[in-house]
Image (cartoon, rainbow, N blue to C red):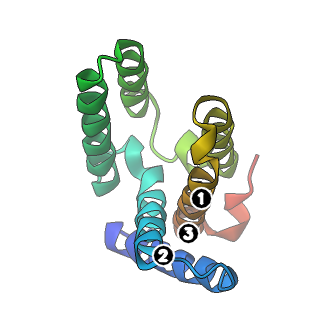
Amino acid sequence: MPNYKGHIVGGSIAFAILVYCMRSYNPTVFTAAEWFCCAIIGALFPDIDTKSKGQKLFYRIIFCCVVVLLLQMRFRAVAFVSLVALAPLLIKHRGITHSLWFILGLCGAVIANAHFFVPQYVNLLFFDTLFFFAGAISHLWLDLGFKKMFRI
């Protein structure tokens, strides 16, 4: 079981592989940096259910989202984000967040909601989610191995 540094390396490798596979796309430096951040966040995400660097990063992102939503006076969204912030406290380590199906469903939900709420950003969110997924897969592979990663 690697520590957070091992997962960051795994996310970096997943990023490099995916960028290589998409070499015909030719992203800008800023786009590549955004994708790299998404891959690293994805690589740390499955450990949000335990005290870790991933959980610390998760709650910092949640805090920023809540502040922005409060400034925009979007109180229903604040309530939803607050409920999402409680989820890691209610699940056991290596439970649902270490499931390939959960990660796939989460990424699918992001894309589906983007189609409904912000259709102008669907392409942007698709690639961000793709790199998040690659980072999360690297985490699962490092923690569980290839066979256990596909358990149902």
Instruction: Check disc 3: other Cα within 10 Å, few if <14, some if 14-19, many if 20+.
Output: many
Question: Label 3 vs label 1: CA separation?
Answer: 9 Å
Q: Quadrant of residue 21?
A: bottom right
Q: Give SS at disc 2.
A: helix
Q: Is residue 95 visible?
A: no
Q: Amino acid at mark 1?
A: Phe
User: Residue 10, which numbered label?
Assistant: 2
User: Residue 82: horizontal and vertical position, in percent?
Assistant: 35, 22
Q: Which residue is mark 1?
A: 133
Residue that protrudes farthest toward the front in the picture: 120
Q: Going by the image, does 92 lie left or right of 123?
A: left
Nearer to the camera, 61 or 9: 61
Q: Is residue 99 visible?
A: yes
Q: Is residue 21 above or below residue 100?
A: below
Question: Label 1 vs label 2: CA separation?
Answer: 12 Å
Q: Earlier in the sequence, mark 3 or mark 1?
A: 1
User: Residue 17: horizontal and vertical position, in percent?
Assistant: 61, 82
